[in-house]
Image: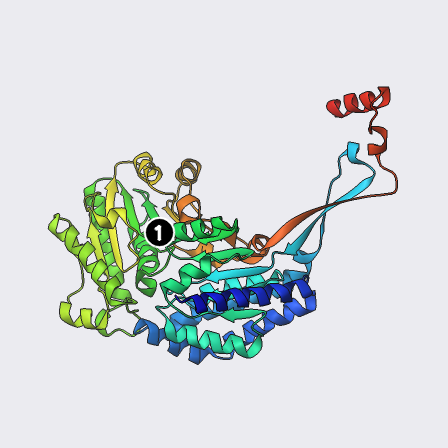
Amino acid sequence: MTDASIAEMNDLLARQRAAFLAEPNRSLKARREDLKKIEAITLDNQQAWVEAVSADFGHRNALETRLLELSVVARGIKDMRHKLAGWMKPQRVSTPLMSMPGRSYVRPDPKGVVGIVSPWNYPVQLALLPLATALAAGNRVMLKPSELTPNTSALMSKLLADIFPAEQVSVLEGGPDLAEAFCALPFDHIFYTGSTRVGRSVAAAAGNNLVPVTLELGGKSPALVSPDYSIDDAAHAIAWGRFLNAGQTCVAVDHVMAIGDAERARTIGHAVAQKAETFYPDFADNPDYTTVIAGQHFARLESMVEEARAAGAEILQPAHDPDAVRATRKFPPTVVINPPENLRLMREEIFGPVLPVLSKPSFDAAIDTVNAGDRPLALYVFSDMSSEIEHVLDHTHSGGVTINNAMLHVANDALPFGGNGPSGQGAYHGKFGFDELTHQRAVFRVGRWHTTRLVAPPYGKRAKSITDLALKL
């Protein structure tokens, strides 16, 4: 990263901040128009988005890009446009008796210039939805997309430049050096989606400027399966929630804890593997199955599975030519049964189409395992008994939860999406995102006369009586 490039980013930030100060509170009409523009480039360029994303991955089915990215952005923006007027209104709150007469309210004010760093795994959704949220909140945005999806980033840069001036929205393309310098800028807020490891660096860089951050991270999201729950139902949901987008989803089922003995885990593991083969027959040539994003990611997954194999774990994979799938980066849907818990598969976020399935003797033992690690981004419970479900919810912490399925809590804009502890901080989607990217400004308005006139120095009996009264209220 050259000094000139850093100077250019600082200059762009200064220009956006000057534009924000010139128009610190964009009107409802202007914000809705901003959202309509993003909705239009999302829906009017579907084929271009599909082709760019597939080119970046090597292959991704058009339906997955349209369903998991474009529809999520379009639906989220539609919800924002319809509800934005209510979100923008100052909210009256109560005023304590001792502060009367007066009115109290909270103004949702824009923060200013928001820096967004988006990831590669859903390169459209996880860039455009935070962007739309920031604009709905009245901010200006500098966006740094992932260098691993250059085709998508270039298309995004062009389409956004066609509808927004650089002083309102700018896309900065580049590698890790640019991202590091980007996060060190004195933004008014930074919104980062990516790994926990990089998230720590982002938070540290932002802390130097006391910039507030939203961190959408990841972690090992477990699925706990009751001994009485239908194996077929659990296997269907878990296979879908693990192998969609080749497991490259932050809320994907990372591993399964089957409540029962080792044979229960083996039965569930085989059922999941069978479902995966049903979903993706001849996976290597299957147009529905997504490619792993890059060679180094494929090699990491391969190394993790081989470590488990060497440790004696049972490995379930469809028949394949290792050299051929390595060349195309179509990693086989893999289930690893009862792996030792000291393996990398059990210590690191997998982020690929590999699923460990292990046994736990009880829900309490599974809960202890969850609580011994970092708080996960998502938690999945498969049970028909409310008592079991509530016991897990009462004794664990996670970003979000789906019960008897996978990932569906993320699809509801009425629910906050975000992590907990090492899996993230802050939340967005719908009004939660609007609130995250606005400053909740406290305002108290008094009339010409106020009770403070009665307690001003020099203090006497009247001030003492009012103070005594305040302590009793």
The residue under label 1 is 197
At x 35%, y 38%, the residue is: 371
Q: Residue furthest front?
A: 3
Say which quarter of the image contains residue 420: top left
Q: Is residue 340 visible?
A: yes
Q: Position of residue 369 (x, y in %)?
A: 30, 38
Q: Where is residue 266 in the image (x, y as percent from the top left)?
A: 20, 48
Residues packed near mark 1 inside 10 Å, few (<14), some (14 to 19) or many (20 plus): few
Identify the image quadrant of the N terminus: bottom left
Badge 1 marks a residue whose secondary structure is helix
402 is higher (above) or lower (below) than 52: above
Which colouring convention does the figure follow?
rainbow
Q: Which of 14 and 146 is in front in this view?
A: 14
Q: Give the quadrant of the C terminus.
A: top right
Percent across and percent down for residue 326 are 19, 69
The image position of residue 82, as x and y in percent, is 64, 64
- Quick check: 304 above or below 174? above
